[in-house]
Amino acid sequence: MLRSAAFLLALAATGLVQADTLCSLPPVSYAKAKTAYPASAFAIEALEKYGIATWYSDRKDNGDYAQTAANLVSSCPEDSRISVVVHGLPNKDCAAKESAVGSTVQSASDYVAFLNTLTSTIGKRKVLYILEPDAIGLLADTTACGQSAGYLANLQTAISLLSQNENAKIYLDVGNQTLENPATSTAVTDIVKQLATAGSKVKGISLNTFNYQSSSKLSTLCSSFQSAIGSTDLHCIFDTSRNRNGGPSSNEWCNVKSAGIGALPTDQTGIRNVDYFLWGTPPGVSDGTCQGHTADSIPGPGAGVFFNELFQSLWNQGILVVEKGYPSIDGMGRSLTPSASANQEQQSQDQNEERQAVTYNATAPPNSSKTSESAPSTTISDVDQTKYYKSSTTQTSTETTDQALTPASPIPVSKAQQVSTESSRTSTMGTGVIIFIALVAAAVVALAVIVGIRRRQKKMVNAAKTPELSALAPLPTTIVDFRPHIRTTPARDYELA
């Protein structure tokens, strides 16, 4: 029994050590939005404690990509896994051309330099790459421009360079619709086969970027992909930033009013072929104006702009409010941290839920540029605006946005600070697990003592029944208490690093 208790303790400790810790920089737009929309500030700050994948982009509007990579590496703990969306393909968005505006990578040689800057900065650090959103969709559509733009050769170059890091995990971004559409699904699997060659660090595909589909639907789609490609070696990752309530029956994809923030970033998905839930889309970023769309959409600003009405809707209907005890946004100013009762409820829930990976978000001071007096009307955008191909049975439009998220200006590394709230909460969860196992072990020891005493009592009773003792032995003058006296000491809390 003692060996069993020790095994349980070792198993719990092993599980905690093996958790993958995702790390990224927060969206620059969030810093501006907290000033522009004070009522939403506490909710925005709460989301900053979780990792929204950092977009490494060549667009001038997104700042110096070399500085972005440097800030990311210097801010993330050594044992974390950095999460990056790579978005610098030459002739990117060759159909709509929106996110190509301001791009500095114009040729294959430029792309190699762009990638070498990233890989030399990352080094041998653990990293998760989501590679070139929209590219495979344009390649799979034979009527589009991806093939003539040289996408396949450049993607192969990217995979070759990124795979030189033995600690890298690469996921090829694949639009949901390209897998659902019979006209393109076969082409997608053929392209993935060409890219996921032996020796590469391609681990699978990424689904639901800037979309709303439920994890259950995505899981079915992932299994269908594995069947089509004829292998279970390639897994999936899901963008859960806006998918808690799934997509509407109308197949609306633009600023969906029923959507809510979905599952927290973690490597503990509970789905065999899904490696990660992560947030690739910053909640609150507009999908577009939604003109001519269904009643399930919220008309908003242009694609890539922080849209406060959408953000509030996502927050109020999302996991942090519905399941984690955070308050909804009601127009009242609030503290930027959840209440003590919410923290207690969260700790209790975390101890009973499946273990989630700690997620760091390396924070940095806001842009040095001052906010205008008329802040609420200020355009807040730090993402690319790219057209995604999205098929719909109820709409004639087949385009939406692919938005790249990177800091708009360099972040002073000396001032970067790691948010420790999420780490502390996970530490509390880990401490609770250890205490629980320790109590189980103590109970096992106590049970063994009680069993031993019971056996001793039985022997004494049997001995007392012999004729000699029953006839001659005097009654005891004192009462012997055979109940076990177990001294207990309060369990100590140990701070987990």
Image (tube, rainbow, N blue to C red):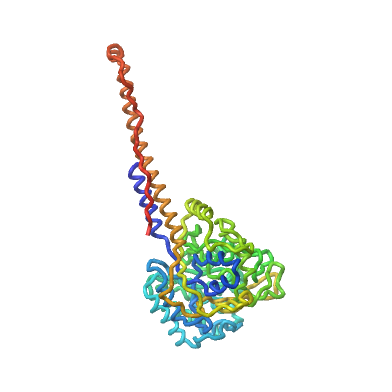
Q: Residue at x 64, y 70 (%)?
A: 255
Q: Does residue 263 appear to the left or right of 118 in the view shown?
A: right
Quarter of the rendering occupied by the N terminus:
top left
Mark yes or no: residue 87 visible.
Answer: no
Q: Which residue is drawn at 50% across and 57% down?
A: 270
Q: Where is residue 211 in the image (x, y as percent from the top left)?
A: 59, 69
The answer to whether residue 319 is above or below residue 453 is below
Residue 489 or residue 171, whichever sits in front: 489
Q: How many marks?
A: 0
Q: Does residue 20 appear to the left or right of 248 in the view shown?
A: left
Q: Position of residue 33 (x, y in %)?
A: 57, 72
Mark yes or no: residue 154 visible.
Answer: yes
The answer to whether residue 466 is above or below residue 173 is above
Q: Does residue 83 appear to the left or right of 8 in the view shown?
A: right
Residue 105 or residue 300, whichever sits in front: 300
**Residue at the outermost top position:** 471
